Image (spheres, rainbow, N blue to C red):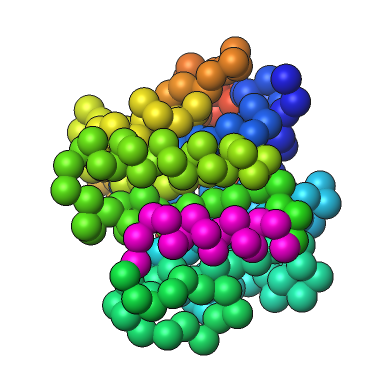
């Protein structure tokens, strides 16, 4: 099986070289755990370092703000967008029934998963994308009535993305201490892999970790790995490194 480099420093070696090609992976965690940074790093490095075009669908955070935020990491999205190596699809404002200023956005009337897919497929085809991100599933979910609907929607998303040949990440939120890995408790069963990000504050110390909860067809690390967000983006550490430093 071919592997897709994650672009996240330290992660590939925990996954037999990367994500299984053509599969869908859920990136789950509470607010501020780094889901958006993780996914953007996958798309950015995919385009910049590995020459693989990527599509980033943002449903929570406006594209203009994402572009601004990641300048901190030295990631110039605009430049890659101009080269058609990366495209942001704005799904934030369509949900409010307002037109977007972005080149790629969702139709303003009757927002649903099918319309989202249609637009995403169009952009994937246009730039020949190999990577895609849907950030986030709960942001699609305000009109989902039952977990069965969510399961069907996530299944449809991952199936269509697989058919288009991309390796896809989707984000979902969880509350710390919650036994589920996705907001609805069904997303994690449908996807091929689950990466969980944690953030724990203890006194004046804060502690970020990453855990590979599942990755089909992969012999992967089962440890809770310390992660760091610096001005270079996200780095995943091996457990031994931490012990060595202590
Ligand atoms: N330049 C930076 N250096 C260090 N840490 C940073 C930097 N930029 C952001 N962070 C950390 O990353 C967090 C934001 O990460 P991100 O937006 O990826 O989280 P998220 O899981 O997507 O959150 P949400 O659920 O709100 O969408 C910030 O709250 C901050 O703690
Ligand atoms: Mg986010």
Identify the residue shown where x is 21% and y is 38%.
147
Q: Answer above or below: position of 74 versus 45.
A: below
Q: Position of residue 217 (x, y in %)?
A: 59, 15
Q: Position of residue 174 (x, y in %)?
A: 27, 42
Visible residue check, residue 161: yes
What range is drawn magenta here? Answer: 111-126
From the viewer's perspective, is 172 left or right of 149?
Answer: right
Identify the residue shown where x is 43% and y is 41%.
156
From the viewer's perspective, is 150 left or right of 168?
Answer: left
Q: How many marks?
A: 0
Q: Position of residue 1 (x, y in %)?
A: 72, 20
Identify the residue shown where x is 70% and y is 57%.
125
Prevailing secondary structure of the magenta residues: helix
Magenta highlight on residue 114: yes
Q: Quadrant of residue 60?
A: bottom left
From the viewer's perspective, is 207 left or right of 166?
Answer: left
Q: Position of residue 109 (x, y in %)?
A: 34, 76
Q: Quadrant of residue 6?
A: top right
């Amino acid at each position: 099986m071919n592997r897709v480099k994650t672009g996240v420093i330290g992660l590939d070696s925990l996954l037999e070289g990367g994500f299984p090609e053509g599969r869908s992976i859920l990136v789950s965690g509470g607010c501020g755990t780094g889901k958006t940074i993780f996914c953007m790093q996958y798309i950015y490095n995919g385009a910049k370092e590995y020459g693989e075009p990527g599509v980033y669908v943002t449903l929570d955070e406006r594209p203009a703000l994402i572009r601004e935020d990641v300048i901190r990491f030295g990631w110039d999205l605009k430049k890659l967008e101009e080269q058609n190596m990366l495209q942001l699809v704005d799904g934030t404002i369509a949900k409010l029934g307002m037109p977007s200023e972005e080149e790629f956005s969702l139709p303003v009337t009757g927002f649903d998963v099918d319309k989202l897919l249609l637009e995403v497929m169009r952009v994937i085809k246009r730039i020949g994308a190999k990577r895609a991100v849907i950030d986030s599933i709960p942001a699609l979910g305000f009109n989902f009535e039952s977990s069965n609907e969510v399961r069907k929607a996530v299944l449809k998303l991952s199936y269509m993305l697989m058919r288009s040949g991309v390796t896809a990440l989707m984000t979902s939120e969880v509350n710390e201490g919650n036994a589920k890995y996705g907001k609805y408790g069904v997303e994690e069963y449908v996807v091929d892999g689950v990466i969980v990000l944690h953030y724990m504050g203890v006194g004046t110390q804060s502690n970020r970790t990453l855990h590979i909860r599942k990755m089909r067809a992969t012999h992967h690390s089962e440890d809770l790995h310390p992660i760091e967000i610096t001005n270079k983006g996200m780095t995943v550490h091996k457990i031994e490194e931490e012990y060595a430093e202590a």
